[in-house]
């Protein structure tokens, strides 16, 4: 903590704080714009200067956002798809990461180090470089426009395995040995002894995974051509391409698409922001 | 007897890691090898003809293609123009936030808030604000004291590049601020106190203490943000889909997508994928060298 002493230092300090607040306000402008514009009729959104406080709540935008361009209400289906895909991916990522991390952290077998390095090496393969081969495989398996196709490449990732392994490295070996002496089976030990002790790290991993998956655009773009199987990011792209003059409805779509993540953030912000820090320490 | 237990546990360990090994083999290693092999052919989607082996012809074509070099340029401009300001601003903001007496948490939250939104949402918000009649023009005109000038945020080739950088900068600034705050918190306060007693002012302690001790975090953030920028896709895709000119922001990922999926030229798109992979691998190797090499000692 820095403590200003002389008057000059105090002035500088206040100036710095003022600049920080100004910067934060600037960062918030687009978000405030999204929220206010979603509740305004078109005329008010384009008013000069911008009317920061909406006159009442204009629900028309939200209705147009949900109805879509063709009154099909496909947004609701796309929203459901995003939920299903993100939940499945989160579930499998947590499960497979913890099983693998546990195997790597608490068992000795030949090739263990090699397996760990191999998994870490996949972090260097960007999805953008392998999406076309994956797409070709998906077409051969005929899993386009299906939940299997949407989730398959993301069932687990190297970061999740790494996170769980690092966490479990510090888990006391004696607990495992004690359970084994008591005659417990390995799967039971994992489920009843190890997993319950991983709740905080599992929460972090879940939040990161769900959020990342909610954001995924590229893979669904390749794999989901039918309107019914699209996810929210695809709906937004289509809506924006067709209705970019309808700012109110566009901001309503943006707001609706963000709500689930905002709710997740408000309930689990500790793990959310913790996630950023976890990322930063993954090398150390 | 004891050996038997160890062997049994080793088998369990293998059983626990096998599913992930199988997954990564099928969905990471196989595709990258497959991408390389495909890049040596003239494969096309939907074509019933067997693809021919063409050697490094796709690579040769790309190196002589102005369109490909334009993508390299667009990606390089975007990456440099985004990650350098991100690095500098997030470090300075984090440093000043840790010096605040009150409200550290709320101000962190304010800077972090865009990071909660998905990248498509971020792009769509900016798309509205950058509209000729939108907030961005109003704001810039007020700032410059001009009136009614359209700065062509989504139309002119320079401005549309700047606009994509702006979206990215806005979206990620808070994320890196948080990482730097975590890094700053790991510097023992005693070091600063000693410097203050020795008569160092704040700028001196920033330059002489913070920067050197923060080197691993700085290396990490610069490589992380650089790799992120090289992979940028959503903003450029959404902007071009909504009518922005394509060429200035035709970054390499967008080019891979269009070449492979729209133009069905799988071989050529795979060659581009491999080039992107090699570039990123190079940067990762640099990161490992820079941040893994030495430990900081206090």
Image (tube, coloured by chain):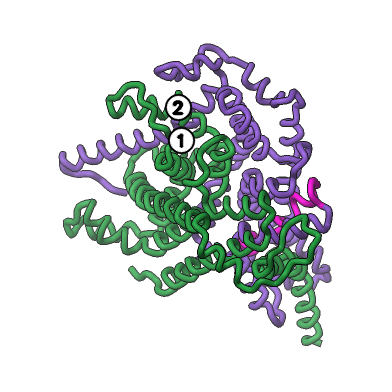
Chain colours: A purple, B green
The circle drawn on residue B251 is none
Q: What's drawn in magenta, residue-wise?
A: A143-162
Residue depth check, mark 2 versus mark 1: number of the one nearer the observer:
1
The reply, left or right, for residue A69 in relation to residue B212 is: right
**Residue designated by label 2:** B132
* Residue A144 inside the magenta-drawn segment: yes
Query: Dominant secondary structure of the magenta stretch?
Result: helix
Q: Which residue is depicted at the point 50% across and 40% down?
A: B245
* Residue A145 inside the magenta-drawn segment: yes
Q: Which chain carries label 1?
A: B
Evaluate if marks 2 and 1 touch, with contact meaning CB atoms under 8 Å apart: yes
Crowdedness near tag 1: few (<14), some (14–19) or many (≥20) residues, C-alpha within 10 Å: some
Crowdedness near tag 2: few (<14), some (14–19) or many (≥20) residues, C-alpha within 10 Å: some
The reply, left or right, for residue A24 in relation to residue B39 is: left
**Rendered location of residue B242, percent (x, y):** 57, 35
**Residue designated by label 1:** B155
Q: Is residue A163 visible from the viewing direction of this image? A: no
Quadrant the N terminus of chain B occupies: bottom right
């Amino acid at each position: 903590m820095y403590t200003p002493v002389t008057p000059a230092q105090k002035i500088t300090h206040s100036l710095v704080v003022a600049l920080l607040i100004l910067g934060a306000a600037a960062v918030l402008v687009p978000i405030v714009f999204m929220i206010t514009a979603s509740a305004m009729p078109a005329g008010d959104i384009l008013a000069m200067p911008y009317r920061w406080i909406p006159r009442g709540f204009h629900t028309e935008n939200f209705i147009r956002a949900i109805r879509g361009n063709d009154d099909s209400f496909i947004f609701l289906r796309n929203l459901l798809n995003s939920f299903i895909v993100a939940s499945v991916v989160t579930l499998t990522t947590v499960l497979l990461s913890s099983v693998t991390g546990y195997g790597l952290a608490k068992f000795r077998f030949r090739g263990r180090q090699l397996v760990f390095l191999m998994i870490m090496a996949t972090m260097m393969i960007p999805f953008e470089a392998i999406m076309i081969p994956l797409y070709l495989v998906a077409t051969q398996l005929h899993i386009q426009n299906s939940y299997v196709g949407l989730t398959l490449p993301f069932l687990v990732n190297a970061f999740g395995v790494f996170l769980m392994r690092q966490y479990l490295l510090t888990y006391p070996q004696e607990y495992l040995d004690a359970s084994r002496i008591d005659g417990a089976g390995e799967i039971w030990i994992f489920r009843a002894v190890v997993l319950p002790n991983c709740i905080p790290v599992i929460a972090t991993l879940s939040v990161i995974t769900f959020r990342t998956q909610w954001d995924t655009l590229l893979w669904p773009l390749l794999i989901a051509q039918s309107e019914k199987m699209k996810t929210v990011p695809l709906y937004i792209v289509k809506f924006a391409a067709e209705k970019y003059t309808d700012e109110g409805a566009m901001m309503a779509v943006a707001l609706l698409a963000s709500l689930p993540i905002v709710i997740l953030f408000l309930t689990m912000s500790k793990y959310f922001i913790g996630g950023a820090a976890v990322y930063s320490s993954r090398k150390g | 007897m004891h050996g038997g237990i160890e062997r049994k546990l080793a088998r369990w360990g293998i059983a626990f890691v096998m599913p992930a090994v199988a997954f990564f083999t099928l969905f990471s290693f196989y595709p990258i090898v497959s991408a390389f092999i495909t890049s040596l052919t003239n494969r096309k989607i939907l074509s019933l003809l067997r693809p021919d082996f063409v050697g490094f012809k796709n690579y040769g074509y790309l190196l002589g293609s102005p369109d490909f070099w334009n993508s390299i340029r667009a990606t390089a401009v975007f990456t440099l123009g985004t990650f350098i300001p991100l690095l500098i601003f997030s470090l300075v903001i984090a440093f000043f936030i840790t010096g605040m007496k009150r409200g550290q948490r709320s101000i962190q939250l304010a800077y972090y808030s865009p990071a909660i939104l998905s990248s498509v949402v971020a792009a769509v918000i900016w798309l509205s604000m950058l509209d000729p009649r939108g907030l961005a023009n109003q704001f810039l005109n007020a700032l410059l004291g001009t009136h009614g000038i359209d700065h062509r945020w989504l139309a002119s080739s320079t401005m549309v590049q700047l606009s994509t950088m702006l979206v990215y900068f806005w979206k990620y600034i808070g994320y890196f601020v948080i990482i730097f705050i975590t890094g700053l918190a790991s510097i023992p306060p005693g070091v600063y106190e000693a410097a203050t007693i020795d008569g160092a002012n704040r700028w001196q302690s920033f330059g002489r203490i913070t920067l050197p001790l923060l080197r691993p975090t700085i290396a990490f953030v610069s490589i992380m943000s650089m790799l992120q920028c090289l992979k940028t896709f959503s903003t450029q895709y959404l902007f071009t889909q909504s009518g922005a000119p394509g060429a200035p922001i035709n970054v390499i990922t967008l080019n891979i997508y269009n070449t492979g999926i729209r133009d069905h030229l799988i071989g050529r798109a795979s060659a581009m994928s491999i080039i992107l992979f090699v570039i990123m691998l190079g940067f990762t190797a640099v990161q490992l060298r820079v941040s893994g090499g030495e430990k900081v000692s206090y």
